[in-house]
Image: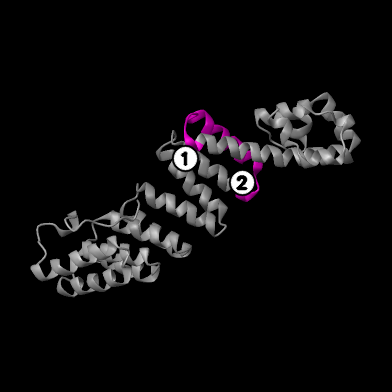
């Protein structure tokens, strides 16, 4: 979820209305927040919390202000306090996860995601954060496992396949990445994420075509195999190209090729 400023009539107040004195500080904080005066707004939210220290919404708003002021440790502290005041609401835990990721506290994000999933096992946001946190610390296998769980929950969500492709690409498994990018385009071809997947495939094609050209210039046997069977020869070397990449490869004249062709193979992709 997005961490947003909470209205003072938010659900966290329940039936317990703020006192007149508390409302003075809440309104001041809201006004100062609109002006970008976060330090003063934070001070007034803390004053409101001294009057009503058990109010989850005030802690949540304090967290919003601290996050806006880039005071992430204070934001996390406020969100933990909010969650203690209202332990039955996963949204507060989700907000905490968002701040963990924004502040680069990936190990903490992992621990908090696991904690949230113990109570709400099907929480999608916690799994999403967990997979991205594993990716950020370079634990690609765990990132893939969690992403597969997301795909199991919603196999037609193209975004999850895109995330899986990114993890494979970071892991260096280009072929698997290409497969997942292709699935994105198949599942939701008109979406923005499909456009991103197409651009990613074009980039990977370009990268691999450079390598293929270099190998062809150095290895006459490989060059001869390309002339006979472009797709098969490339696959033998472990290359996995998109349909556009294979088409570009077929247009190349390897016999007349020079080292300068390794600099701009992309022209074949868009010709």
Q: Is residue 180 magenta?
A: yes
Q: Answer whether residue 131 is visible to the viewer in this image.
A: yes
Q: Residue at x 14, y 68 (%)?
A: 24
Identify the image's colour scheme: rainbow, by chain, secondary structure or one colour: one colour
Disc 2, SS: helix
Q: Which residue is mark 2?
A: 169
Q: Residues within 10 Å of mark 2 (few under 14, many from 20)?
A: some
Vertical position of residue 50 compared to residue 181: above or below: below
Looking at the rendering, which quadrant does residue 261 occupy? top right
User: Residue 3's mark?
Assistant: none
Q: Residue at x 51, y 39 (%)?
A: 161
Q: Answer whether residue 238 is visible to the viewer in this image.
A: no
The image shows residue 81 at horizontal and vertical percentages of 27, 68
Q: Which residue is mark 1?
A: 159
Q: Residues within 10 Å of mark 1 (few under 14, many from 20)?
A: many
Q: Which residues are magenta?
A: 170-193
Majority SS type along the magenta span: helix
Q: Nearer the viewer, residue 56 or 26?
A: 26
Q: Is residue 161 magenta?
A: no
Mark 1 or mark 2, which is nearer the start of the sequence?
Answer: 1
């Amino acid at each position: 979820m997005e961490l947003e400023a909470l209205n003072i009539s938010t659900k966290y107040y329940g039936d317990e209305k703020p006192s007149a004195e508390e409302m003075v500080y809440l309104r001041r904080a809201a006004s100062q927040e609109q002006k970008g005066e976060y330090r003063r707004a934070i001070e007034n939210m803390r004053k409101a919390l001294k009057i009503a220290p058990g109010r989850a919404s005030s802690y949540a708003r304090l967290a919003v202000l601290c996050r806006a002021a880039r005071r992430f440790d204070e934001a996390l502290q406020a969100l933990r306090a909010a969650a203690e005041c209202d332990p039955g609401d996963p949204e507060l835990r989700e907000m905490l996860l968002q701040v963990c990721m924004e502040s680069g506290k990936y190990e903490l994000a992992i621990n908090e995601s696991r904690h949230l999933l113990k109570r709400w096992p099907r929480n999608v946001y916690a799994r999403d954060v967990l997979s991205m946190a594993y990716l950020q610390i370079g634990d690609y296998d765990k990132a893939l496992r969690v992403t597969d769980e997301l795909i199991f929950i919603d196999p037609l969500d193209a975004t999850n396949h895109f995330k899986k492709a990114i993890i494979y690409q970071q892991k260096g498994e280009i072929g698997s990445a290409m497969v997942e990018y292709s699935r994105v385009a198949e599942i939701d071809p008109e979406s923005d994420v499909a456009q991103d997947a197409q651009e990613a495939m074009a980039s990977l094609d370009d990268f691999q075509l450079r390598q293929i050209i270099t190998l062809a210039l150095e290895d006459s046997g490989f060059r001869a195999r390309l002339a006979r069977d472009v797709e098969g020869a490339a696959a033998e070397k472990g290359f996995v190209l998109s349909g556009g990449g294979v088409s570009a490869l077929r247009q190349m004249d390897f016999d007349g090729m020079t080292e300068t062709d390794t600099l701009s193979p992309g022209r074949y992709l868009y010709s």
